[in-house]
Amino acid sequence: MAVTACQGLGFMVSLIGIAGIIAATCMDQWSTQDLYNNPVTAVFNYQGLWRSCVRESSGFTECRGYFTLLGLPAMLQAVRALMVVGIVLGAIGLLVSIFALKCIRIGSMGDSAKANMTLTSGIMFIISGICAIAGVSVFANMLVTNFWMSTANMYTGMGGMVQTVQTRYTFGSALFVGWVAGGLTLIGGVMMCIACRGLAPEDTSYKAVSYHASGHNVAYKPGGFKVGTSFGSNTKNKRIYDGGARTEDEVQSHPSKYDYV
């Protein structure tokens, strides 16, 4: 029961995490304009992975997509790739984990196959969460670098006495959504891997080869084939010759001179 609950909870947490990663990738507010000490308040700029938008004080919003691929910064393209890879791996992991749920029976699929599928989906969720967290962190690092560079350039005129108007960007809401979603996906993958250990059947049967000691000793003699047991002496068919000095078997194996008379 605990294994089923852990598997189901891991699936639900991963599902929420993947949905959050998709939402963060599609959001436009990855970077928003910093309004601190900004004299221009009539226009508000924010940017995403796929387009940049401008919102005026009247409420009108205009967005423009990035119609170039080679002209974009390399870091932005890397973030795009990480988020897309995270979504693809998460979607495949969700598909595999649906068939791996213990409450769903498909044909003659055993617990061993479900355990392997649960482990596979858990690993995919972990990689998906890592890709999302890495992509968001790379973009956040790029924002921090550009922010401090823009801040330094604002006070370069007249020995720092004159402030130039320059747009600075800070963290947008999409970054926080991406961090939380990546963490949830990572936690869900770990829970799926933990549930895999409980689904795997325990092998308690030991394969061994039993050896039976033979109870019969076979002796080959010139007089023919004779079988005797080793558990007791068979004295019914034995005859004594020469006053008990030799038995019938010894006489047959060692003929005397009287046998040829």
Image (spheres, grey):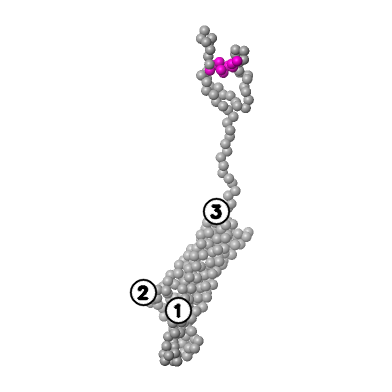
Q: Residue at x 55, y 60 (%)?
A: 193
What residue is disc 2 on?
70
Between 11 and 175, the one nearer to me in the picture? 175
Q: Label 1, on which residue?
A: 145
Q: Residues within 10 Å of mark 2 (few under 14, many from 20)?
A: few
Choose the circle earlier in sequence order: 1 or 3: 3
Q: Which residue is mark 3?
A: 112
The type of residue carrying mark 3 is Ser
Membership of 218 in magenta stretch: no
Tell me which secondary structure the magenta stretch mostly adopts.
Answer: helix
Give the image location of residue 17, x and y in percent: 53, 69
Q: Position of residue 20 (x, y in %)?
A: 52, 71
Q: Residue at x 51, y 19 (%)?
A: 222
The secondary element bearing badge 3 is classed as: helix
Q: Which is more N-terminal, label 1 or label 2?
A: 2
Please give the name of the residue rendered at 60% of the width and 27% of the height, measured from the top-left corner.
230
Asked if labels 3 and 1 touch by Cβ distance under 8 angstroms, the answer is: no
Q: Residues within 10 Å of mark 3 (few under 14, many from 20)?
A: some
